Image (tube, coloured by chain):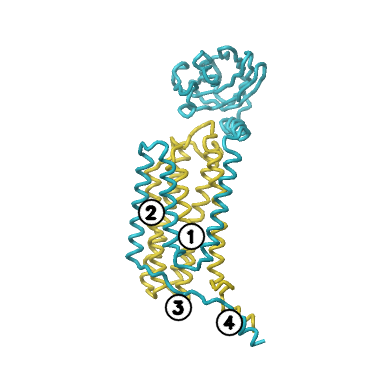
Amino acid sequence: MTSDMAHGEAQLPEVEHSLPSIGPRQYVMIGVILTVITAIELWVSYSSLGNLIIPVLLILSAVKFIVVVAFFMHLRFDHPALTRFFVFGFVLATAILFALISLFWNDATIIEGTRQETVHAAAEGGAAAGAKLEVALGEFHVGAAGEAVAGGAEFDVKNDGAVPHNLRVIKTDLAPEALPVGGGVVDESQVEVVASVADLAAGATGSATATLAAGSYVLICNVPGHYQLGMYAALTVH
Amino acid sequence: MAAAAHGTVHHSSTGIDNRKLLMWIFLASECLFFGSLISAYLIFKGASLVGPYPEEILDIPLTSTSTFVLLMSSLSMVLAVYGAEHARPRMMKLWLFVTVLLGLAFLGFQVYEFRAFGQEGLNLSTNQFGATFFVLTGFHGTHVGVGVVILSSLLFGSFRRSGLGSEAGFHVEVAGLYWHFVDIVWIVIFTLIYLIPQ
């Protein structure tokens, strides 16, 4: 038994207890380098490098990552097996990231699901079980009552036209015809959309709920070109 | 007898201390955890129909400052490890203390950011950006918090008469691995969420 144990211990590889061969001065230098890289990243993010911004930022980020892992985490000086374990996990995580993104990037289901969730979120906890507001969409006009009372509201939308239309309810002080436009549609990132109904085929109906605060709103169809053709209507909430 | 031998010897068949090996395997698994959260953020990025949107609310100068703070905490951590491994307890205590302070400062920045976003109307249920952003950065902040607790316990332990014992260098090094990992995750988050144009 003793000889077996001795034999087992003899088989253990020699344990590496050697300390990294760099000291505080080198660590501080590495810290300075990491700070400089971060400053460069910041400059790049505000620069006008166009399509180069993303690859440059990713490369700089990767350099920082590798420097920290190699020197601060001592992986460069440690047992190679530790590097393999960590790289395996990192590569697996990166593969999962690419797999998920390639599966779901611009996925119609997600976008549509988001629309529905967002409509409910805009209703602030689903409190909007109040007044019904009927909206009729057609070429190229939005038909709706011009006034409503603050509180929960349900927009019942019908596409009376011959082509698909949708509805966006926008809270804004801008005139109905003066919303910011980009690429043929109202730029929704520049306005506050409080309710929305996805594209409706001709004859289809849809609905959305929202809690309306007092103020000015504009109802629009944001199918490309339709807003410019006159598909907007003002709504004042008292 | 064999058990007794195992009780004192911590090395795996690779020759690596099994506690250190465990930490590295744990960190590798954490890559998968954060990789999934980052994937979710990127997939839902741009899917929000109501604001606030990332480009209108993310405060890059503020976050750059907190990133610098976390980066410097990695430097102070490695200096603490150096002190612990070279039997320089005062150096170890000083830099452990600095690391804890910098970690707390980073958490302070995050609390300030979350509160500011809340006042702007962004929370977990506002839109897809809010949901994925708060989950991702919140989990990272939780990791920083856990790191602060671990480092604080080491710092308090180092003031005992026996200090951190004969394996002080090892304990601080393993805690340092966790802390540096939290830093490298933030390096990725800072680039992907804050710096890359929306």
Residue B147 disc label: 1
Q: CA distance from mark 3 to mark 2?
A: 32 Å
* Residue that carries the numbered disc 2 in the rendered image: B69
Left or right of residue A232, residue A34 in this image: left
Left or right of residue B91, residue A212 in this image: right
Q: Are circles 4 and 3 on residues that touch, CB within 8 Å?
A: no
SS type, badge 2: helix
Whether residue A102 is visible to the viewer of this picture, yes or no, is yes
Do callouts 1 and 3 point to residues on the same chain?
yes
Q: Is residue B53 shown above or below A150?
A: below
SS type, badge 1: helix
Q: Position of residue A76 (x, y in %)?
A: 45, 64
Q: Point out the frontmost of discs 1 and 3.
A: 1
* Mark 1 residue type: Gly
Question: A15 or A112: which is nearer to us?
Answer: A15
Q: Residue furthest bottom?
A: A2
Chain B, colour shown = yellow
Dot 1: chain letter:
B
Residue A10 disc label: 4
Q: Point out the frontmost of discs 4 and 1.
A: 4
Q: CA distance from mark 4 to mark 1?
A: 38 Å
Q: Position of residue B80 (x, y in %)?
A: 40, 67
N-term-proximal mark, 1 vs 2: 2
| Label 2, residues with CA under 10 Å away: few <14, some 14-19, many ≥20 | many
Chain A, colour shown = cyan
Whether residue B151 is visible to the viewer of this picture, yes or no, is no
